[in-house]
């Protein structure tokens, strides 16, 4: 007999109900108040609040008590329940992120955490979050007119910052390699956040000065941390920060030198200083071109000097950093690269060359210039002591690079370091090609520098090395480029041990437009029995047609040619005058009609027109020369 269907339906329903999983209802939140709250503006048994507190308990491992300030209930009564639930949800999210990403921090925080407190402070400017001193409670302080009790990630950021601030002391003796990567990043951020400026004590002689500043301690710790195993991006960040911290030491040397000197050797400042220098030396191969350029600008520290006075290196800066070795390595790279003016993809390397070496370039007037970033810092160190001079000289002799020597000696002359230049000049005398290159560099940069000692040295070489007289003629011509007797020509004629030969004069003229422009200046040292015109005429077209010649003197080439003709006339050299006349006549034939540029010179060199004049020929100075430098009778007479 079949049972009716109606009999089975209730039975099946009962079975299904008994077999279905039981839905777990979150427990009520454990809530306490700072005082009697009276009627609550929220349902403490509400499902959403229970869900939020259950999620928070899932993060912490046990339920947290919500401790509420009754002042919050009164101030935010209209939306208190929504604000509280959202705050608990945000707290669960933030603590969950800390648990997931900061294992060391969470390991310290979670076991003792029991309470999430909310307090009202009408004077507070914004919501703040703090882990209380007893470490059992996280307190959220809510200000007046707040739009939320706990913004999203506010607890995450605040608690992380609070914990991270203690990391430098936590790892004062070093960071173990097994520490998590986020912990290492946090430690680094905590170190680099401690960057107050150096403080000057009232009495550097009696006070600690910069000796134990937190920033110096941070640098020392970061350098120790640098060798701990870590991801490359973190190591790169530490590397960049440590390099930038060289400015901390540089500023201290320049602004508070007395405080630096007063600091004990064992102070954190000097420990950090030594560690930083050691780090730069140990990691030299890791530095990029830009970083090496940055390092160069840091370590070559110069004392402030009065206007127009040369600055001197700060002797006590970065003790242990070998500035000479650093600079010479840059010189070596520059020489090996062929003294480049452009290196594809390595513009920063060129900046390093410009800063250390100061290579010369010609401007649009044909004058030699140095790069704008050149401050001759390396050269200042290279001439500061005899030991440094010897090291630089030995380097020049070992490299045997003529461009390098010419550049170095030229820069020393530009710095008005004639005595130092003379030391190097004599030091390379045994290497003729280097010596000639150095002579050219000195000559082109001699300017108004006092050259008394250098002229004595030049006279000695004139006597002992006759084959170098052509180079010496060029040097002397640049010393006395205006013919104002900066060279004692009479003494040279009497003591020189011989005059310049035709070959010497030809070598001299090989120096180009400057030599042709000053050929008349060296006339007193020219020997007899050979034609000056034979040496001059082949190069006159190039000299006259060179558009840069007037930059040396605005009246050139005509003025220089007038002076040469005057010299020939004064020594009654009619044969050379005839050759010059022939040249000018031919030159005039190729000029446009009406151009009388060389008519006067052709007329002056005509046979019979020369009237030897015993008066000395004196050359005009440049039109823009300072008035104080002009001497009476400095305008050259017409021949």
Image: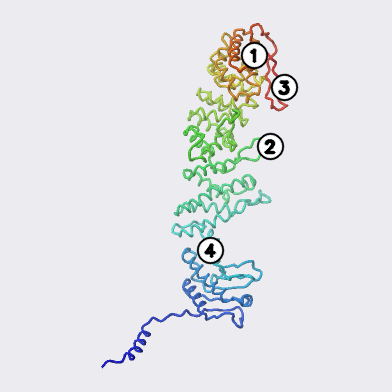
Disc 2 target residue: 307
The percent position of residue 517, horizontal first and vertical second, equals 61, 20
First in sequence: mark 1 or mark 4?
Answer: 4
Give the position of the C terminus as an image quadrant.
top right
Distance between the Cα atoms at labels 3 and 2? 27 Å
Distance between the Cα atoms at labels 2 and 1? 47 Å
Q: Which mark is residue 601?
A: 1
Disc 4 target residue: 160
Q: Is residue 632 visible?
A: yes
Within-10-Å neighbours for mark 4: few <14, some 14–19, many 20+: some
Q: Is residue 457 visible?
A: no
First in sequence: mark 3 or mark 2?
Answer: 2
First in sequence: mark 4 or mark 3?
Answer: 4
Of badges 3 and 2, the one in the foreground is 3
First in sequence: mark 2 or mark 1?
Answer: 2
Dot 3: element? loop
Which of these two is toward me, 269 or 105? 105
Of badges 4 and 3, the one in the foreground is 3
Disc 3 target residue: 631
Q: Which mark is residue 43?
A: none
Residue at figure coordinates x 68%, y 50% from the top left:
203
Distance between the Cα atoms at labels 4 and 3? 77 Å
Distance between the Cα atoms at labels 1 and 4? 89 Å
């Amino acid at each position: 007999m079949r049972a009716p269907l109606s009999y089975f339906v209730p039975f099946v329903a009962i079975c299904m109900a008994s077999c279905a999983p039981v839905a777990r209802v979150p427990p009520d939140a454990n809530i306490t108040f700072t005082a009697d709250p009276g009627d609550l503006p929220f349902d403490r048994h509400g499902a959403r609040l229970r869900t939020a507190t259950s999620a928070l308990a899932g993060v912490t491992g046990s339920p947290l008590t919500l401790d509420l300030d009754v002042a919050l209930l009164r101030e935010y009564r209209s939306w208190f329940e929504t604000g509280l639930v959202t705050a608990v949800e945000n707290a669960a999210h933030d603590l969950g992120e800390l648990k997931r990403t900061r294992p060391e921090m969470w390991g310290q925080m979670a076991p003792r955490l029991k309470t999430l407190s909310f307090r009202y402070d009408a004077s507070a400017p914004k919501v703040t979050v703090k882990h209380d001193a007893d470490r059992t409670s996280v307190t959220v302080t809510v200000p007046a007119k707040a739009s939320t009790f706990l913004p999203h990630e506010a607890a995450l950021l605040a608690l992380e910052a609070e914990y991270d601030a203690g990391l430098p002391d936590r790892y004062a003796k070093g960071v173990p390699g097994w520490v998590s990567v986020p912990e290492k990043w946090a430690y680094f951020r905590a170190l680099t956040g401690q960057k107050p400026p150096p403080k000057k004590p009232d009495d550097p002689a009696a006070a600690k000065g910069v000796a134990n500043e937190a920033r110096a301690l941070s640098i020392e710790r970061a350098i120790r941390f640098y060798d701990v195993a870590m991801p490359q991006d973190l190591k790169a960040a530490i590397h960049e920060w440590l390099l930038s911290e060289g400015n901390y030491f540089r500023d201290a040397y320049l602004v508070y030198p007395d405080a630096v000197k007063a600091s004990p050797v064992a102070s954190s400042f000097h420990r950090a200083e030594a560690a930083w220098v050691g780090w730069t030396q140990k990691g030299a191969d890791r530095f990029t071109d830009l970083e090496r350029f940055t390092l160069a600008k840091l370590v070559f520290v110069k004392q402030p000097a009065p206007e127009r006075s040369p600055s001197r290196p700060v002797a006590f800066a970065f003790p242990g950093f070998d500035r000479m070795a650093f600079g010479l390595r840059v010189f070596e790279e520059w020489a090996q690269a062929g003294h480049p003016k452009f290196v594809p993809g390595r513009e920063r390397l060129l900046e390093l060359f410009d800063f250390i070496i100061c290579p010369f370039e010609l401007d649009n007037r044909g004058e030699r210039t140095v790069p704008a970033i050149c401050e001759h810092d390396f050269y200042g160190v290279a001439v500061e002591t005899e030991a440094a001079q010897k090291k630089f000289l030995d380097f020049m002799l070992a490299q045997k690079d003529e461009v390098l020597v010419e550049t170095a000696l030229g820069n020393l002359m530009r710095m008005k370091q004639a005595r130092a230049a003379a030391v190097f000049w004599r030091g390379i005398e045994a290497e003729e090609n280097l010596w000639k290159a150095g002579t050219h560099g000195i000559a082109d940069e001699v300017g108004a520098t006092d050259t008394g000692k250098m002229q004595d040295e030049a006279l000695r070489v004139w006597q002992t090395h006759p084959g170098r007289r052509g180079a010496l003629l060029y040097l002397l011509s640049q010393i006395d480029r205006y013919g104002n007797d900066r060279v004692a020509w009479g003494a040279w004629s009497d003591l020189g041990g011989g005059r310049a030969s035709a070959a010497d004069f030809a070598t001299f003229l090989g120096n180009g437009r400057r030599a042709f422009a000053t050929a008349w200046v060296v006339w007193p040292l020219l020997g007899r029995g050979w034609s000056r015109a034979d040496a001059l005429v082949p190069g006159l077209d190039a000299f006259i047609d060179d558009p840069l010649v007037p930059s040396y003197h605005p009246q050139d080439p005509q003025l220089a040619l007038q002076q040469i003709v005057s010299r020939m006339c004064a020594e009654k050299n009619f044969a050379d005058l005839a050759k010059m006349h022939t040249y000018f006549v031919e030159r005039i034939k190729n000029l446009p009609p009406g151009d009388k540029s060389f008519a006067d010179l052709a007329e002056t060199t005509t046979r019979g027109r020369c009237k030897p004049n015993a008066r000395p020929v004196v050359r005009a100075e440049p039109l823009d020369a300072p008035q104080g430098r002009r001497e009476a009778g400095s305008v050259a007479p017409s021949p």
